[in-house]
Amino acid sequence: MTSALWRRLLAEFTGTALLVTAVVSSGIMATTLAPDQVGLQLLANSITTAFALGTLILIFGPVSGAHLNPVVSAADWFLGRRAGTGLTAGDLGAYGAAQVLGGVAGAVLAHLMFDLAAIDFAGKERAAWHLWVGEVVATSGLVLLIFALARSGRASVAPAAVGAYIGAASWFTSSTSFANPAVTIGRAFSDTFAGIAPTSVPGFVLAQVAGLAVGVGLLTALYPDAGAAADQVVVPAEPATSGDQGPPTRRADRRRSPAKPPPNAHQIDAEHLGVDKPSVLFVCVHDAGGSQLAAGWLRQLAGDAVEVRSAGSAPARQVDPAAAVAMWEVGIDITGQVPTLLRPATAASADVIITIGRRSDLPDFPTGRHENWDLDDPTGLGVEAIRPIRDEIRNRVARLLGELRRTT
């Protein structure tokens, strides 16, 4: 087991433990301060859970993705298989074990803080069909939310969104939204407000698995290429800091980085181009797909001999995940690039401006050298659909470099 995987498992164990601690402890505190007021107890419990979940995702997300939930990990593995992203099968098992053990440890910790018996199995029966329906709704909605955020490039808002959803679902579902097998098992070890009888756990877990299936089915229908963004769930794991740079996936722990393409006839250096570097600006609407592919190719082929920039008239929050995967397949990492707003000064300082996409969607550039590459926008497409666009952009970039050699 790699050191990186150990760190991720520690994060999943600790994060899940603290989540269950927050759920159980807030229930204990609520029943102590507001006895016989069940509505107030649920309010305190749901608010605490929502805030704690969001905070824990912020803390542990950069390390492990902060799944804190076997359902989320299972969806991440299932959706990422075709795109080569997400958890491996082995990591999925390790994540699940760490999460379940963390859930039990969290209940024990909560009891110790309130001077209760370390383990006190719950006696609260929660075995009824309408509660199971509530769990299907809660779990499917959670899966749909998380992966829709990742696929649409909004993983950065996951801490707030996931916390808000779970807090709300505590009220609009009949089961009060467990939506997490690890948390469900952990709560079975606590005979408190948040407890669930061990005999009720299997029914809840089966309902959560059903919710997983429903959520993945909806996600696949709405976002067919959602698997390309599996590595953004819930919060992207931090990149490697030493050694070979890993791909934009957590499978980096088990595979080597692809080798850089060898130099070829299109590669140029500063001697070919002259003392002054030409400046090339690639522009597309969101600066998340076509312009980033082109800029990545130019940096790869030209090295430091060309100043390369990209921008967009309506920049997205991050580079399209599927585009990043497609570029990684050819040994180019664009995950560190940030979509940038196109400004007049940026365009004015460029020697060459290349717009990518339909002319009607892009601004006019009346002065200087401007060329439009009328290509499909790769943003929102799957990796398979992006590959031919990626390769066509490479050919055009290579021709551009040939022209720069002749004109400098």
Image: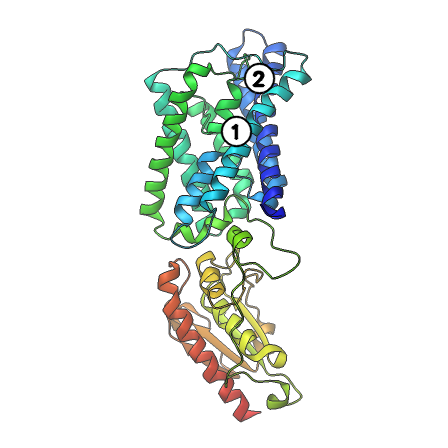
Outermost residue, top side = 36
Cβ atoms at labels 1 and 2 below 8 Å apart:
no
Q: Residue at x 55, y 26 (%)?
A: 103
In the rendered view of the protein, which quadrant contains the C terminus? bottom right
Residue 61 visible in the current orientation: no
Query: Residue 249, labelled with which disc?
Result: none
Color scheme of the displayed model: rainbow
Q: Secondary structure at mark 2?
A: helix
| Tag 1: amino acid | Val
| Pointer 2 local density, CA inside 10 Å: few below 14, some 14–19, many at least 20 | many
Query: Residue 100 got which mark?
Result: 1
How packed mark 1 is, by other alpha carbons closer than 10 Å (few <14, some 14-19, many 20 or more), is many
Look at the numbered disc 1 and give the secondary structure of its residue. helix
> Which residue corresponds to mark 2?
27
List x then y, in percent, for residue 180.
Answer: 47, 29
> Percent x, y for residue 221?
31, 46
Nearest the viewer among 157 and 390 is 390
Looking at the rendering, in which quadrant would you find the N terminus? top right
Looking at the image, which residue is at 53% across and 13% down? 121
* Location of residue 380 in the rendering, given as x and y in whole percent from the top left corner: 40, 57
Q: Earlier along the polypeptide chain: callout 1 or callout 2?
A: 2
- Horizontally, residue 181 falls left or right of residue 214, namely right
